[in-house]
Image (cartoon, rainbow, N blue to C red):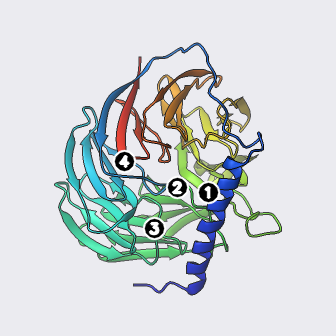
Amino acid sequence: MLPVSRRVLRSTLVTLSLLSLGACSMFSSKDPRYEPAELTQYEAQVSAGVRWTASIGGGGGTGFAPDVVGEAVYAATPNAVAKVDLMSGRVLWRATPDITLTAGAGSDGSTTAVVASDGNVIAYDDAGREKWRARASSAVFVPPLVDRGVVVVRSTDYRIQAFDAETGEYRWDVQRPGPALALKASMQLLAADGLVISGLPNGRLIAIDVRTGAVQWEAPVSVSRGATDLERINDVVGSPMVAGPLLCGVTYQGRMTCFDVSQGGRPAWDIPFSSHSGMATDGRYAFAVDQRDVVHGIDLANGEQVWAQNALRNRRLATPAVVPAAVAVGDLEGYVHFLSRVNGDLLGRLNVGGGAVVSPLIGTPAGVLVQTGNGNLVMVNLN
């Protein structure tokens, strides 16, 4: 096990405390600029309904996100991990570890990984039986990634580590210097063509060979600015996105940048942007939620804003998802909102219950997959 410095532990605790207080002040202030927008009436253009609901466990958090592999969904809560049939919602297996979980789930259909509060990565086989445990270097609040025979995690000491998916044996790690403070927000790793692509708390994207741990590429999405540690937070949030030759990322208090991988990873364009939840793409547009929960449609060809929808401002929107008819976002009251991908118009909404939607929404062939704040999975479809 790699040692964790007191500085890392201290800055992690300070980060969580400051940002929790910051969130309370931003969204609880009586200043109307920060109050969640009231939901307005409009003529619905789509009909949204619940296709199925499955109970996974209790609770949720920014470290939890469903993972869809073929016809199955793998999901975790602080007290459970499960496999669910994508089309019917039938729970195929559920495991209840003997310790609270902080992140999950990641799966390749054979190995499913979660992370516990003591830093242990826990792997299950596809019958829900525990395979192994291996200790990460520090706490983990980002869902693991499982790809090409390895389980990859990103820990709070700014280290990306890989373990053998069959045995749990340590394979490699990559570490970068980190800032004094980092954002606790929804973040995910991306697997693409044998690479694991990760955002970092210093506003950078990094691409690592998933088998060897060799760094293949690294570049800044944005550069931190400001007089204080809080002002200089510019973490990459959500998941990196691939659209054709473009690899894109967005940061908090920074920028949205797309790199052209066909040109050696050079920046294709970048724009000022601050997001707390990340972005999604349909291959033509990027859809991103800004710091005030205004939803933006951005042209991937040049970075120009196509539309902005501010009817959901300050409603703490989760990472968007794209479905054929719309882009979907979940909010602090359990509503899922559907917006036009073309012009951002509100098309419909549905309350799925379970409190605030924190986990990223996922577009699937069966509809929009939502992990609720109380530990349910809900499949929402459009008519």
- Crowding near the residue tagged with mark 1, few <14, some 14–19, many ≥20 C-alpha atoms within 10 Å: many
Q: Are marks 1 and 2 in contact (CB under 8 Å)?
A: yes
Q: Label 4's element?
A: loop
Q: Are marks 4 and 2 in contact (CB under 8 Å)?
A: no
Marks 4/3: CA distance?
A: 19 Å
Of residues 46 and 323, which is closer to you in this image? 46
Q: Which of marks 3 and 4 precedes in the sequence?
A: 3
> Label 1 belongs to which residue?
236
Amino acid carrying label 3: it is Val
Q: Are marks 3 and 1 in contact (CB under 8 Å)?
A: no
Depth check, mark 3 against mark 1: the one in front is 3
Q: Which mark is residue 375?
A: 4
Q: Which of marks 2 and 4 precedes in the sequence?
A: 2
Q: Which of marks 2 and 1 precedes in the sequence?
A: 2
Marks 1/4: CA distance?
A: 26 Å
> Label 2 belongs to which residue?
187
Q: Quadrant of the C terminus?
A: top left
> Label 3 belongs to which residue?
140
